[in-house]
Image: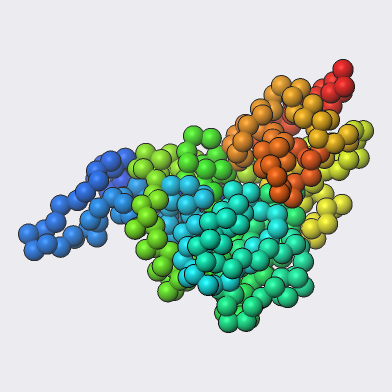
Amino acid sequence: MSDEMKPLNPETLSAQALGWLEPTHKSLIPGIFPSTTYEREADGSYPTGRAYTRDHNPNYDQPEQLLCALEGGRDALLFSSGMSAALAVVQSLRPGDHMIAPEVMYWSLRNWMLSVGREWGLEISFVPNGDLGTLQAAVIPGRTKLLWLETPANPTWVVDDIAGWAKVAKKVGAHLAVDNTVATPLLTNPLKLGADIVMHSATKYLNGHSDVLAGALVTAEEDDFWARVKVNRSAGGAIPGPFEAWLLLRGMRTLHLRVERASENAMAIARQFEGAKGVRCVLYPGLKSHPGHDIAARQMTGGFGGMLSLCIEGGEEAAMAVAARLKVIKRATSLGGVESLVEHRASVEGAGTPCPPDLLRLSIGIENAEDLINDINQAMDGRNR
């Protein structure tokens, strides 16, 4: 028998944070390094490779390398937020370049593209989610440099074929960047499906405790485009503090448990309310009735995530009434924490939103599923009282 171990599974990699030990004291948990600067040698060199904390803090090393291992990437970078991570990619384009993004996606990034991005000189086309034919027609040969994809797409959870988008990108020499925040690397690995860069709002599932603002990027190749992304981070200074990076690593160690439980709870809720009185529809990729279910089943492994939306009969007023009556599920922005949250996205996003006015977005946490179902039931029963 061979003494060599088989490659470790993602659950083990995340739980043990790659199995690293702090080299000085052999502690299982890393220290926190608040120093902003590092001493040079007498000859002016930096033997540790660290000069200034803006992009060289030791607390970045472990979570970045763990993300590389989970996503199957060559390099990773932490950022101060998901938005700053996304913008580091988009701003690595040059004025006059063309990029394509889906109509339904993270609202704040879409707004930036529509305003600042276009003012900055980017040409941006938005295409319907789930339509590869429209995507191909939107390509401008020689000018399309970036395809930005989010799947499942917030907040309608439309599913796109990552491998299909990757084929379009490679055909025209463009990069494909995929927002993998909702699926997490435990359910989907976009790089293995042909994507070039993966983005995470690490504030959400990677951290999982609603107490850290952070973002991350992982690349398949360390090419010239990635070099520009690294310059953007270093020069822009959009990096997390050492304590935030430490907290992020702490959260990543339970990623598999939280994602598994949230996915199970979301599936139970989706099945419970599909076809229920007062519910116009349930939007969840795990349901066979979902238009993107077959694609999701092919590219998502181990579950369909913790995000779903309920469209309430009676329109916006009825949906708001249901949200107002929830007692266990909290009315708050964000997603991916251990606690369940609800939000009426149309009123949050405002004018121009593609979100239906009767839609309630639910981020399902790790509570008891029966308690969550009972909470939604009492809110539905009492909305017109």
Q: Residue at x 66, y 66 (%)?
A: 125
Q: Residue at x 46, y 59 (%)?
A: 88
Quadrant containing the C terminus in the rendered view: top right
Please give left or right for residue 96 compared with residue 294 in the image: left
Please give left or right for residue 218 compared with residue 298 in the image: left
Q: Position of residue 157 (x, y in %)?
A: 73, 51
Residue, far left? 42
Q: Residue at x 40, y 69 (%)?
A: 227
Q: Quick one: 349 or 135, which is closer to the camera?
A: 349
Q: Position of residue 322 (x, y in %)?
A: 79, 28
Q: Residue at x 85, y 20 (%)?
A: 382
Residue 2 in sight: no
Q: In this picture, is 95 found above or below 46? A: below
Q: In this picture, is 196 found above or below 277? A: below
Tell me how many marks there are. Answer: 0
Q: Residue 180 lies in what quarter of the image?
A: bottom right
Q: Position of residue 360 (x, y in %)?
A: 75, 37
Q: Quick one: 170 or 338, which is closer to the camera?
A: 170
Q: Quick one: 2 or 206, which is closer to the camera?
A: 206
For the rendered model, the colour scheme is rainbow
Q: In this picture, is 96 found above or below 158? A: below
Residue, far top? 385
Please give left or right for residue 86 compared with residue 317 in the image: left
Q: Position of residue 63 (x, y in %)?
A: 43, 50
Please give left or right for residue 220 compared with residue 153 in the image: left
Q: Residue 97 lies in what quarter of the image?
A: bottom right
Residue 119 in sight: yes
